[in-house]
Image (cartoon, grey):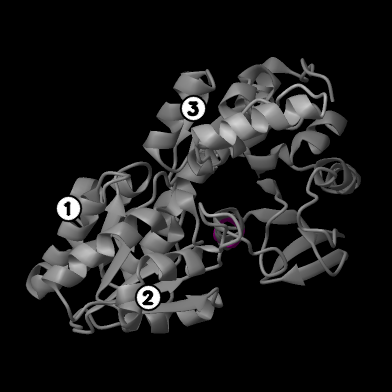
Amino acid sequence: MKIAIISYEYPPDTAYGGIATYMYQIAKMLTQRGHLVEVFACSPYRSGTHIEDGIKIHRILEENRTNRRNFSGRIGKVFAERHTIVHFDVVEGAEAGAHTKGSLEINPDIPLVIKLHTPTFMIDEINYVEPSLQMKIRRFFGALRRGQKPKPFFHELYNINTDIERLHTLEADEITTPSKALGEKLIAEWQLPSEKVFHIPNPYIPSEELLNIPVETQTDVVTFIGRLELRKGVLELTQAIPNILQQYPKAKFRFVGALWPSPQPGLDMRRYIEKQLKRYSNSLEFTGPIPLDSIPSILATTDVCVFPSRWENFPNVCLEAMVAARGVVGSNAGGMFDMLDSGKAGLLVPPHAPDKIAEAVVELLKNPKLRMQLGRVARDRVLSEYNLERIGALQEASYIRAIERRQALGKRVADYAV
């Protein structure tokens, strides 16, 4: 098959998160399976076409990372020009950002697969902090003094009928979800047609460095990897740390990832956590963001990884920790429930539950035999469930279904305004 992948994020230029990792993994996987794959992506410092890892990458220059609105239309023109030469069989993109919309408007006959990652409305909803009554009153009267109508809060603004990410996803011939939880949630909340939604986990290609990490370690280090933001559960982990240290004083806590705003205006999340845990500063370490090739060394000196997200679709950091055979404490809200095999490959905790986080972490710290047993199961599970052969076959079947559906339906007629 001739497959086009359209994504704002694609390594190394725009390796901002899980979407970039996924697109890179499937491009490599499909190329290795004999398909022609071309990627259409963005870059903050270059444009043009380059061959990387045997894959043709078409990039457009966009220096301002926060301005992604123009990407869909601009990349659509690049895709359309290339499509007249290659005649792609199918296009894949993410729901987040609706970045395949411009390509579809120019070529409405192209079969489209949308991979769910986590829509913007969900991220905004999870990261939303309910303002205090005092803040609401101040905002209300401040608007009146300026002669303005008070602006509604997030939950009062959202409308599925005007959400461009949802509307574009509905145009897809097939919708795939790496976690069952996300598919079920969006079938309910976005009213997606269930017959078009298929569960296909993301592929994962483990590095030799991760596979070679010994199962038997005793470092007493508990590591969090990910953006330090509300959605990732860092506040709940912060609240759990005093409880953990009371029961296991030798524990050290390492936070790996970029700093995001905290609930307190003017403080980033590191400063906020340090303020909350001032008494325990000797037990804390903050590395900031690190390159991907540094992850194995971080995990090699870790006993327990904690990912207590309020919601998580399909976190690669969890797979990395599993391949490294670490003891994993993960949230049961989202894809980690599937990854950790309902708790057989790691311990699951509910979101917003500091006491449960503390209980699970202490159990793994005090019981190295259990931790190492779970680590072995986790490593084997990644190798058996997320390998290229299994996921590649599922991916190919998905594209074939999309192509057949589009052939049966003919050209699309857009039902929303651009």
Q: Amino acid at mark 3?
A: Leu
For residue 206, say whether it is visible: no
**As drawn, 161 above or below 221:** above
> Badge 2 is on which residue?
254
> Badge 3 is on which residue?
186
Secondary-structure class at tag 2: strand
**As drawn, 25 above or below 209:** above
Circle nearer the viewer, 1 or 2: 2
Is 244 positioned to the left or the right of 322 in the image? left
Q: Residue at x 32, y 45 (%)?
A: 352
> Quarter-wise, where is residue 184 in the image?
top left
> Badge 1 is on which residue?
344
Q: Which of marks 2 and 1 precedes in the sequence?
A: 2
Secondary-structure class at tag 1: loop
Percent position of residue 260, x then y: 57, 60
Q: Nearer the viewer, residue 134 or 373?
A: 134
Percent position of residue 93, x then y: 66, 43
User: Which mark is drawn over residue 336?
Assistant: none
- Other residues around mark 3 within 10 Å, as few (<14) / some (14–19) / many (≥20): many
The boundaries of the magenta stretch are 26-30
Q: Amino acid at mark 2?
A: Arg
> Quarter-wise, where is residue 238 in the image?
bottom left
Q: Residue at x 78, y 20 (%)?
A: 411
Circle nearer the viewer, 1 or 3: 3
Q: Quadrant of the C terminus?
A: top right
Q: Check whether the beta carbons of the residues at disc 3 and disc 2 lie within 8 A of each other.
A: no
